[in-house]
Amino acid sequence: MTAINVQNLDVWFGSVSAVRSVSFSVAQGQSVGLVGESGSGKSTILRAITGLAPDWSGSIQALGQDLHGAARDRSFFKKVQMVFQDPYASLHPRHSVDQVLSEALHLQGMDAISKRTEKLLDDVGLGPRFRFRYPHQLSGGQRQRVAIARALAGEPEVLLLDEPTSALDVSVQAEILNLLTDLRADRGLTYIMVSHDLPVVAHMCDNLAVMQNGSVVEMMTADALRAHQAIEPYTRELLAAST
Amino acid sequence: MTLLTVNDLWVRFPTRQGIFAAVRGISFELGQERLGIVGESGSGKSMTGRSILQLIRKPGQVQAAEISFQGRNLLDLSEREMRSVRGNEISMVMQDPKFSLNPVMTIGAQLMEAYLQHNRDNRQSARKKCIEMLNAVSLRDPERVMNAYPHEMSGGMGQRIMIAMMLIPDPKILIADEPTSALDVSVQRQVLSIMDKLVRDRGMGLIFISHDLNLVAEFCDRVLIMYAGRIVESCLASKLHEAKHPYTRGLLNALPRLDNPRAHLEVLQRQDDWMHAPLEQTQ
């Protein structure tokens, strides 16, 4: 079954078209990566899916449900969640980890919130002693774990990851990538991951789409990329720059 | 020829929990070479770069047996004398051009200000000199760039402008603090090779501070690896992949690699004794 299906997607910001007729689909339990330099429109696709970029045309289906405009209902957010790039900016500085997670759980209509908060912290490898800390008392990696825990609150099926590790050190990046790998294996999650780092995307994803100037220039499997079977000159250029 | 000698450098910050040492007694020398300093955030690599130029403000304290540049101990200089060293003799390129350029001045005005600060010259030849410099960093249409404001420039262009500005007074040493971390991979190489070429042509010393091991291995001659304010290993860049220290190995193995797919990445296991490790020479 397809989890996310995007057909002929165009996204505008005012008169600027940021994404031009992009089509791809992600099967359930699969992970797809979007790679490209900044301004290539890779994050904009995620924003269009979640309703953060209101001006788009084409069709987007999420778990069999057709999406329109910028409005998304509760059932959508229960199934599809997003993790942002900057863990420093995506947590409320005056809310403790407990508040952040219990608010997310409450909004997702969960019961036994206290118990679930503990479970969430456990799942992302933080443990109960982090429960009453504030974001400034956490390191970048720990903050990103909290952001991932918050996304997992509603037990979603699809995670949209917008450069989840590009603000982190390589050693912390390895920890977060391992966590994401384990979570996907345990819960059968579907990932769409955006990154400018080819090795990271190849590590996490089965398939990837290379983007330039708002269009997908090439789609290929991670194995084909490793075997140097890239056809487009732009993909080769990116490859040369990242090895 | 040794350009810069740093001996037993400490940087300390008083905090409510007592004194925190960000850099703990490191020593190194820089000749006409490209020296890379790598480490995670918080390892003290930026503080090392800043303390050479004495850019650490109170309440931070810099202490060293010596930081000598061409026979002069920089620690003995007054603030006024230090100002003639900064820019003229030792320059620094910061991480993000967005925060280093003045948003309400044209690029040209800023470049010319930097040039006239260090040279007695009239405005016309200053302008010509600046345009030459913009050409040297491969900016297309330098006339247009001179009249543009920083927000009209992309990140890569901004960083090249910063490099041009830093090189105008013809310094002996360039300290580049994560000069390409805010840039795209494809632009990164371009900016680095421009910097590399200029540094080599002029016989300058380069201190390249970065968290990207591969980049450093490629663009430097020698690498210092820092952990918790100490240099844990120093090796030739070409031999970085044969590094022995478990911290360096950990950092190298934590990177996902295209040619070596794994289900799980190796996670760095920190050990307390690294904090006290003496410098291991592996040259």
Image (cartoon, rainbow, N blue to C red):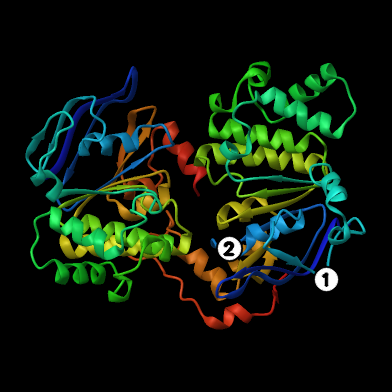
Residue type indicated by callout 2: Gly
Residue type indicated by callout 1: Ala
Q: Residues within 10 Å of mark 1 (few under 14, many from 20)?
A: some
Q: Residues within 10 Å of mark 2 (few under 14, many from 20)?
A: many
Residue at x 33% of width, y 53% of height = A92
Residue at x 56% of width, y 69% of height = B248
B31 vs A229: above or below: below
Q: Which residue lies furthest to the right in this view?
A: B71
Residue at x 19% of width, y 56% of height = A104
Q: Where is residue B253 in the image (x, y as percent from the top left)?
A: 47, 66
B219 vs A236: above or below: below
Q: Is circle 1 on the same chain as circle 2? A: yes
Q: Mark 2 and mark 1 in contact (Cβ < 8 Å)?
A: no
- Which numbered circle lies on residue B65? 1
Q: Please name the residue that numbered disc 2 is placed on.
A: B39
Q: Position of residue A192 (x, y in %)?
A: 26, 46
- Mark 1 vs mark 2, CA separation in Å: 24 Å
Nearer to us in this view, B236 or A187: A187
Left or right, B44 with reference to B82: left
